[in-house]
Image: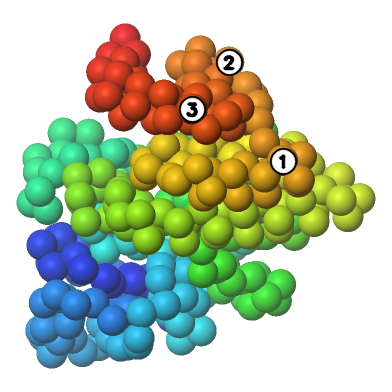
Amino acid sequence: MKLSVIVPVYNVEKFLPRCLDSLLRQGMEVGEYEVICVNDGSPDNSAQILANYQAKHPDIFRVVTQENQGLGGARNTGTALARGEYVAYVDSDDYLIDGAYRYLLDTFCKDKPDVLHFSYQNIYTDGTQVPDSDANLEGRVVFDGDGAEAFNNQILTNNVWSKLYKRTFLKEHGIHSEIVICQDALFNFEVCRHHPRTVIVTSSLYRYENGNVDSIQKTGKKEVVMVQLNELLYNMGIVERYLQGGEEDMRPAALRLRNSFMRLYYKKMLVVPLTKNEWKRHTDILGRKNRRKVKNDTSQWRMNLEANVKNMAGHSYWEYRLVRFLYQHLFREILFPLLITR
């Protein structure tokens, strides 16, 4: 079997048929690939949708149901069951253009790279299939070498869904998804630590959905955000242990990841109103670990402005309250969207 496609499913009933239909249009024969759908305790009608697809296409779709373990846990379940030479991960509110996986396997996987990275486009829809004027399979190789080099130089992105991974490589090195926020970045950091032969191609084949307002990444519920703050501390701890371990291979990437986790940490703090005690506890933790400030590690002045705004939130509680108000009503709603379009 050439390919195992792993699709975690949670609360995506209006997007799921589009995703699964696209996987049926990959130009691959029965027996060449499998689609492992992991129902991660979804509370909506996703389970029935999965059952219908499995009944119609039993030689392609495999459905596994489990209690909710989050995106990383669902991916791990699917990976453990995979039989393909390569593993692909697809978020269930996204989709691929027709024939994408056939093209990638036939064109770029003949000499068996450990990781194949392809491009993607962001889309903003209500779950419908939209005309795709840029759908084009053809692409060229722009990098063929050490994945550590590619990740350090930021030509290999954090996400897992725009890549094919050789299954034996993941198994040999015991690589799995962390059950935390930003698990994609940690997953690829771990992959690249083992210096995979990595091929990067220009083909834009994946469509990443930004219009799903139910996505866990977009939640504003305080209880969820507080959990995510703790998970980000966990992420920073993983990277910090690597930095203190004396290894140098992935140091540029580790420093960048630590700073990106800090950026997101402050962003999450600004999403929900923290009490003074909550604010003090979180900033004290960051201060004790000497990681309180977001560093301006990019040449993009919008990102540097945002970093300075977030750093103000760590100075004092009244500055945090002021910055949160400005961030919610001025920066997030007016200024940042205006800067993005310039």
Q: Is residue 211 above or below residue 44?
A: above
Mark 2 residue crowding within 10 angstroms, few (<14) / some (14–19) / many (20+): few
Frontmost residue, 111 versus 160: 160
**Which of the 4 quarters of the picture holds residue 95?**
bottom left
Instruction: Determine the secondary structure under disc 1.
Output: helix
Q: In this view, does 10 lie above or below 111?
A: below
Mark 1 vs mark 2, CA separation in Å: 26 Å
The residue positioned farthest toward the top in the image shown: 342
Lateral position of residue 73 relative to residue 9, left or right? right
Q: Where is residue 101 in the image (x, y as percent from the top left)?
A: 35, 59
Residue 318 marker: 3
Instruction: Determine the secondary structure under disc 3.
Output: helix
| Residue tagged 1 | 287
The amino acid beneath tag 3 is: Trp
Instruction: Determine the secondary structure under disc 2.
Output: loop
Residue drawn at 21 percent across, 56 percent down: 214
Q: Is residue 3 above or below residue 201?
A: below
Frontmost residue, 163 versus 310: 310
Query: Do tag 1 and tag 2 residues touch (Cβ < 8 Å)?
Result: no
Q: Where is residue 30 in the image (x, y as percent from the top left)?
A: 27, 81
